[in-house]
Amino acid sequence: MVFFFFYHHLMHTDNLNKLHEQYTIEQGYVMVQSYDEDTHRLCLCKKKGDPTKLYGRMVEFKQITLQEIITKLNDIEEIRLGHTNLYTLDTIQAYTLEEHSQTCYIIYNELCTNGVPTTPLRL
């Protein structure tokens, strides 16, 4: 099983179906330092300050590896954020609306490191 937290384009079921047929979805959120709604870039809570909730979907994929998911993400043109194909892959604690937590992977375009991803992932 592989858990992801998705926001923006990957919240849409048609894009999830392009990744894998066997998955479950729960509405949820993660705590981020900041999120730009225009560019969909975010900064995770790694600094002190008042975090904000970013709502999205917690997705559990069954019978597929992380590498297989990343490979399939390369084929989905609709999920690109802006004009980049360099993203950050990280883990984050995600919460259901009922406050259950799960460590999930998150893929994002980083807002707080001058555009240089801490863990680069090319899509």
Image (cartoon, rainbow, N blue to C red):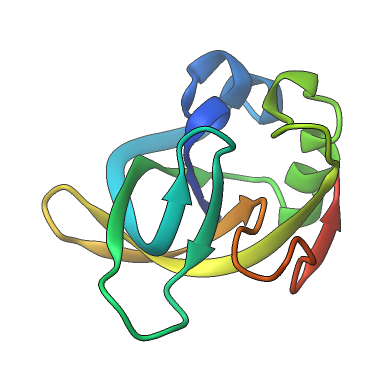
Q: Classify the position of the C terminus by image quarter.
A: top right
Q: Quadrant of residue 93?
A: bottom left
Question: Where residue 73 appears, x then y in whole percent?
Answer: 77, 36
Does residue 98 lie above or below 15 as drawn? Answer: below
Question: Where residue 89 appears, x then y in whole percent?
Answer: 69, 62
Give 32 or 103, whichever is nearer the viewer: 32
What residue sits 71% from the left and 19% below the top?
78
Does residue 52 lie above or below 51 as drawn? Answer: above
The mark tally for this picture is 0
- In the picture provided, is 113 more to the left or to the right than 70? left
What residue sits 56% from the left and 30% below the top?
10
Please, which residue is most extreme toward the left here?
Answer: 98
- In the picture provided, is 85 more to the left or to the right than 15? right
Does residue 108 lie above or below 92 as drawn? Answer: above
- In the picture provided, is 103 more to the left or to the right than 98? right
Give 53 or 76, whichever is nearer the viewer: 53
What residue sits 47% from the left and 81% below the top?
46
Q: Classify the position of the N terminus by image quarter.
A: bottom right
Question: Where residue 25 appears, x then y in whole percent?
Answer: 38, 35
Question: Where residue 71 appears, x then y in whole percent?
Answer: 85, 42
What residue sits 73% from the left and 66% below the top?
114
Please, which residue is most extreme toward the bottom here?
Answer: 48
Give 101 or 6, whichever is nearer the viewer: 6
